[in-house]
Image (cartoon, grey):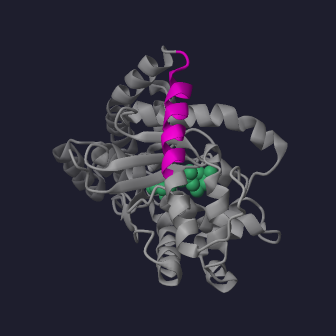
Amino acid sequence: MTKKGRILTGDRPTGKMHLGHYVGSLANRVRLQSTYDCFFIVADLHTLTTKPEREHIANLAQNIHDCVLDYLSVGIDPDQATIFLQSGVPETYELNLIFENLVSVARMERIPSLKDMARAANMEDSMPFGLLGYPILQAADILLPRGNLVPVGKDNESHVEITREIARRFNNLYGDVFPIPDVLVGDVPSLIGIDGQAKMSKSLNNAIFLSDTAEEVTQKVRGMFTDPNRVRADIPGRVEGNPVFIYHDAFNPNVDEINDLKERYLLGKVGDVEVKKKLTIAINNFLEPIRERRAQYQSQPGLVEDVLVAGTERARAEAQKTMAAVREAMGMYRLPVKTL
Ligand code: ATP
Ligand code: MG
C-alpha cells in the first residue's frame, strides 16, 4: 500500500509516559501508523538541554528502554513503524548546525514554551544555548526523514512552526529538499495534571502513568483536585475545567454515564467519591490492554533493544540520503578524499 506521507514525532526519555502523552500524541500515532510511514524518535540528545549532568545521563539507558516499552504497550507496531534513537543518527548533529544558521536569535527568544521549560528546569537566568536551540534540533529530527506530518501536544505547536520556517528558508536558499510539515495536535491538546495546576508532566509529580498499577490509579484519582469551592456533596459544583470531568471526557467511553454525573454534579446531587470511583474504573479499563501488552513485551528479553537497533538503522539510512541531498543542494565543498 502506498502511504499518505511521513510522520516524525517523539519524546524525550526523561521518565515514564503518562495519560497526557497518550491524548496529546500517542493516540494519533497508533491511529495513523498503518496509513503513514512513521518515524518515532526517542530524543535522548534533547534531554541534554535541561539535564546535562552525568547523573541524568546515567538514567538514559533505563529511560530509553522504558520509553520504547511505553510505545509498544500503547500499540505502536514495530513491524509498521520505525522506532529509533536520536543519538544513533549522527547526521542529526550535522543538520542541526546547518539549520542554526537559518534562524535568528530574536526569533528563538520569542518562543514562549522555551521560557516555560527554562523556568521548570530552574534555568531562567542561565538558559543554555542548547535550550534556546531546542526547536532547531527538533527541526533536524523532523526533516532528516523528511517528515510531513508531526503529531504533538499543544506545547510543541510553536516548535513545529520553527521547522516550517527553516524548511522554507532552506528551500528558498538552496532548492527544494524539504517538505513543509503540518502539525497535528491531539484530541486533548494539553491534559491538565491530577493537581489541577499545570499540564500533566513527567517532571511535575502530577501524572498518571501508562505503567501505573490499578491500585496506583485508584490512589491518584482519590487524591485528585476537583472543584475547590465545593466543600460538601450537596453544593452545586463546577463541571467546566474540572479535572475529574476533563478525564471522564477523555477516558470514559460511557457518554450517558458522564452526562448523568455532570447533571447531578451541577445540581449538588452527587459526591466527588462516586465521580472518582467511576473515573477510576474508566481509566483502569483504558489502561488494562496497555498493561497486558506491556507484560507480553516484557516477557521477551532483548526485544526492546532489537526494535530500537533495527529502527535506528533504518532512520540512519534515510538521514544519510537526506544529507547527501542537502550537501548537493548547498554546493558544499567536499575534500577529494574517499573517506570524508
Ligand atoms: P518533561 O517534563 O520532561 O518536559 P513532558 O511530560 O512534558 O516531559 P515531553 O517529552 O516534553 O513530555 O513531551 C512529549 C510529547 O507529549 C510532546 O508532543 C508533548 O506536546 C506531548 N505532551 C506532553 N505532556 C502533555 C499533556 N499533558 N497533554 C498533551 N500532550 C502532552
Ligand atoms: Mg515537556
In this view of the protein, can residue 233 be seen by the observer?
no
Q: Residue shown at 70%/65% (left/top)?
A: 131
Q: Main secondary structure of the magenta part?
A: helix
In this view of the protein, can residue 123 be seen by the observer?
yes
- Seen in the picture, residue 187 relative to 63 is either above or below; the reply is below
Residue 295 falls in image quadrant? top left
Q: x and y percent of residue 78 in the render? A: 40, 33
Q: Which of these two is toward me, 90 or 158? A: 90
Q: Residue shown at 44%/54% (left/top)?
A: 8
Q: x and y percent of residue 322 in the render? A: 50, 59
**156 part of magenta stretch:** no
Q: x and y percent of residue 221 in the render? A: 46, 39
Residue 183 falls in image quadrant? bottom left
Q: Which of these two is toward me, 93 or 328? A: 328
Judge left or right: residue 132 versus residue 187: right
Which quarter of the rendering shows the C terminus?
bottom right
Q: x and y percent of residue 284 in the render? A: 37, 31
Judge left or right: residue 119 versus residue 165: right
Residue 301 falls in image quadrant? top right
**302 part of magenta stretch:** yes
Q: Which of these two is toward me, 158 or 148? A: 148
Q: Which residues are magenta?
A: 301-318
- Seen in the picture, residue 309 relative to 2 is either above or below; the reply is above
Which quadrant contains ligand 2? Answer: bottom right
Q: Residue shown at 73%/53% (left/top)?
A: 48
Q: Residue shown at 62%/56% (left/top)?
A: 92
